[in-house]
Image (cartoon, rainbow, N blue to C red):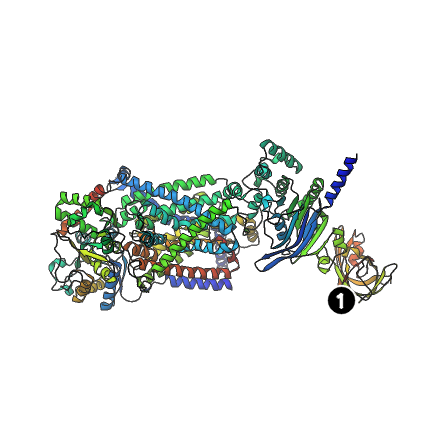
Amino acid sequence: MTTKGVTEEMDSKENEKPMLILKDIHKFYGSNEVLKGVSLEVRRGELVTFVGPSGCGKTTLLRLIGGFTDISSGDIILDGQRINDLPPNLRDTRICFQNYALFPHMTVAENVGYGLKINKWPKDKIAARVRELLEMVELEAFGDRMIDKLSGGQQQRVAFARALSLEPKVLLLDEPLSNLDANLRLVMREEIRKLQERLHITTVFVTHDQFEAMAISDRLVVMKDGLIEQVGTPIEIYERPANEFIAAFVGYVNFMDGRVESIDPATKNTVIRTEFGKLEIALEQDDIQTGDDVLMVIRPESVSLSIDCGSNRQNVLCGTLKTYMYAGSIAKCTVGIGAKKMIVDQYNPRDAQQFQNADRVEVEIPRSVHLLKKKI
Amino acid sequence: MKEKFIAVIVAVIFSVALAGSAVAEEINAYMGTSPDNNAKIVKFIKDKTGITVNQTFQSFGEIEARAKAEAPNFNADMIIGCGSPLAFMAKKNGWSTPYVSPGWKGVAEVFMDSKGDWYNIANFSFVLVGNKDRLAKAGYKMPESWKDLLDPKWKGEIVMPSPLSSGTANMMRFSFLALYGDAEGWKFIEALDKNIHHYTRSGNAPTDLVGRGEFMLGITSDENVKKRLNDGYPLFWSIPAEGTGYDGTYALIFKGTKKLATCKKIIDVLGTPEFSTLMAEIGYVTPRPAPNALYGKTLPKYIKLDLGKAAEDKPKNNDIWKQKLRTDFK
Amino acid sequence: MAAAELSVKLQSSSGSKVKDFLNANLINILAAFLFLLLAFFLLYPIIMVLIKSFQGPSGFTLQYYQAFFSKNYYYQSLYNTLLLGVINTVVCLVIGFCLAYMTTRGPWILRKPLKIISLVPLIAPPYLFALSLIILFGRNGLVTRMFDLHWELYGFSGVVISQTLAFIPLAYMMIESTLMSLNPNLEESAYDMGASEATILRTITIPLLAPGLLKAALLIFVMTIAEFGNAAILGGRTPFLAPDTYTMITGESDFNMGSVLSVVLIAPCILIFFIHNYLLEGKKFTTIGGKPVASEPRKITPLIKVPFVIITTVAAGAIFVCFAVVFVASFYKILGVTHDIVLSNYLDFTSNQAIYNSIRVSFVAAIIGAVIGVLLAYVIVRGKFFGRTFIEMVSLSGFALPGTVLGIGYLLAFSAPPLKLTGGIMILALNCVFRFLAVGVEAGISKLHQIHIEIEEASADLGASFLTTFHKIVLPIMFPAFIAGFIYTFMTAIVSLSAVVFLVSPGFDLAAVKIFDAAVYGEIGIASATTMKLVLIVMICMMILNYISSKTRLGSSMKKTVAV
């Protein structure tokens, strides 16, 4: 009994050590610095997503981890071992490219078994492992097919199976879903997530699609211009973005300028003066003081919309309904408030008909608004 | 806009490219002397008559082949410089236009056809050349007779032109056959072949190859030797004791030319003493006597030849040549 | 009044009928027209050569073939030619592959210079190498004298060396473009799965490049056995078919035997062409997504690096030295004999006319060739008529057509009225057009396969006529193929000797022929200077072309399509 306890303790200690550490990584192409000092720790069994607009350096970072590109300075530590100078074939990372990079002159089974063969597995073991992998991705009947006889989704699975064949310490996925059509993407991302959780495999995922990133990841790494802007869980990123860029990047957002008038130290009830009057919110962050100029991050779906103006309730602004686009489960509206426009998403819009004919509407700003401190 | 701009550029380049240079009086001629001698003759004609002569360099043999292939639709108006076989054949087959040129009055009859079908603008022969440096290094002397060339020490060190492409080589062949008689002549040619490194395409090429020291000895056309000596090639030249052969450099007007008058003007100017002087300065023996650049006033000893028979025998001799000299391959 | 109206109406309706008919059948009409062109300028001359080889003074005869096959000499010639072709092809492929590998996978700083060195010889006549080899390694060559060596340059080995150097650029160009088209992620995936460099080469790169390598091999083989400049200059007494054919025609005007030699030369080419097509059946691999991008430099393992670097250095060095030698020689009156440095070689104006002619011919040929190539590609890919495959085969057969054959064919077919074309610039241009057509057609075909027919259908759907669709949709997309055909034809036409040498006539001399004559004649200085002038002028042409096409938006892809 005691021994078991000891090993468990060791396991958990082992588990606390990050699987992958990036230390102050710089990358130059000529005089062009594409990574400007990136540091990150990826925990064991975690799915981390690099997300950002194109040109932000996310793919370069992934290729650096995979060993396809030399780093200019910094360290990459995989499971405690510095791997800066190891070529890809000696690193315990496996990559799945955006275009899958399946070998077109080989069958599905040969593709999946390629790494095993290279690593000199005996034939029968290769066969067994390939079968196991193909079962895992539900392609057991396709082993003898040539690659070009598969659909996009099937090719995706083969690429995934091939990358997993050698049980890498870190799996690198470079926009693996971008070549699939919208529905298949949803299905595949769920499958990838399920498999990843089941195998408990540390995974770095690269995408430019913020919604995909949020849906699939444990943590997001939002990048811009070769720097990490914010690291956090999807909720943190969405609800408490570190800056304007992130706020706008992870979803549509209405920004409203204001100045903090007062913060009640006990209740954290905060009054903010805006050009449309005073708004009251429940402050959930520590970096805001009275007198700060702030930007209110108002998500369209957090605003509630009602007909009739002049109820004079707290946090309610009156405006003109400019557009109302009914789309079943959601209605997308634009409300003009003063000279500004606000985007409002109305979910489950049962009163759509009334709104379609309405002119003046009320919008209610929620109390849970996130504030960004304006830089002076 | 851009596309249009490019289209215009392309169109301009295209039309410039297509536009010929059709201005003054000009003719196309096959010319078989060496490239720089061709250029000299072209310049002479231009200076004296204003006529532009377009030409490509070909050896005598090649002009002959080409004329045979093209007959009777020649791509040139005239020939300025071909060997006797073609000149005689052209007359026989009616490929040439007879023209009695007043410019040639007073020239010895052997230099022109009685009907005016061809004119011999200059005679040339073949000589032996040797590379001074290579010979000195090897400690060899220039051979004094043609037979000396059969010495095995020359093996792989002699070049001469191929009678399949060179008129000069054909002249060498019929000269040797005339010198030794058919049977002995062929024996000589076969024996010589053992020492020949290879046969060049053009009759002048051995001069350069030997001059640059690639080979020790060469049997080559004489008219270019003077220029090479002047250029500074370390060359010996000699005419072995038995003497040398000769052939003419013929000019004729093709039948069917649309520029007969122009061609006639050229024939006229080729008969002038100035032209003879030019050719003699190059190293030719000319229709109008002029001091020869290579030989001076004493002309070499000639082997007695029947050019007419030589021309007739050419195809037959080519066959024999191929038969005899090509069998030693595996 | 009414009658007039009616007739107008009739006219317009019949007019529109004609228009409709044209619109519906334009592709077929175009196909028929192109086929006629192919038949007339490609098939007919070849058939003439075939006929001539069987046509004795009294009708059909096998005597010329009998003569060929009963003489040891010709056997030897055939054997030498094939051996030269095989050795040359293998060596060129290996070296071309190493060079291409280094310029696409090697370190960044090496890529550009290596690429330039590898490509520049494309615009110099192939026998430039024979010239520089003589200057350096001839019996009285600079190197030979310096070290007092005794070797024999003249003969089989000399021809192999010069011919190999001459065709490395072509091999490089073709292999480089296939290497560029290979998605780098494929190799990276294998690398990622634990494969070493050598294993990647063996299991991924080479199997995937096989079609491209085969194509390159075919082209090099055919060009090698047909291009006779090096063999004529350095062959000594070693017989090869191409120079033999040349002598047979230009020296002896024996068209019967010349035709037989040509047919014998063409036979192995056609055979290889069919083997090539057979091997490639169903081996056209497609990879999914991803634009072709330059691979990042790898940490190449010493096992691969050492031989590759050695081969690359030797090859690039040899090419460089040969060019340098020719450059130096161009300033000497007689290199190695006298030591005066002169400019007279450059001032030789007869060669200027020839260079001007060459550029004219190549330019005209390139324009016509590129246009016909694009149209043919279109007809082959989009047409639905009977005989489409035949047209495809004929237009691609240029890959397997030794230049001498088409040269003699043109001489036979077009030298007598009413089809008399000899003695002008057009016959030279047309000859180049149809000899080098295959590359443009192939580039066009592969470009068209990338366009979905839906785009054209969409355009047609919007009411665009066939011509409008072709003009607005197809042409812009095929522009890179047009440029590829143009550049290939231009560059190959300007230096190629094997066909045009039969067709030059007074006033229409070409630079390649001029240089060959000067080289054969021994005017090394003139030959070198003319080569240098040609190289310089062609470079300027290419730069202008590059500038023009980079001005058009589509031209950006040109560089990638320069090769096939």
Q: Position of residue B83 (x, y in %)?
A: 19, 54
In the image: residue A161, left or right of residue C527:
right
What residue type is disc 1 on?
Ala
On screen, residue A110 versus residue A323, left or right, reads: left
Q: Quadrant of residue A375?
A: bottom right
Observer-nearest residue: C437 or A332?
Answer: C437
Residue at 45% from the left image edge and 39% from the top image edge: C278
In the rendered image, the vertical position of residue C274 relative to residue C376, given as above or below? above
**Residue A267 spot, x, y in % from top left:** 87, 58
Please tell me how many numbered marks the rendered image carries: 1
Q: Where is residue C211 in the image (x, y as percent from the top left)?
A: 48, 43
**Residue A253 visible to the viewer:** yes
Question: Mark 1 falls within which chain?
Answer: A
Is residue A108 at all visible to an observer of this figure? no
Task: Using the image, determine if residue C29 lies above or below residue B297.
Answer: above
Furthest residue to the right? A266
Are there few (<14), some (14-19), or many (20+) residues within 10 Å of tag 1? few
B107 and C434: which is toward the camera: B107
Mark 1, residue position? A339
Position of C316 relative to B321 (above/below): below
Position of residue A166 measured from the top left corner of the image (x, y, whole percent)? 63, 39
Secondary element at image label 1: loop
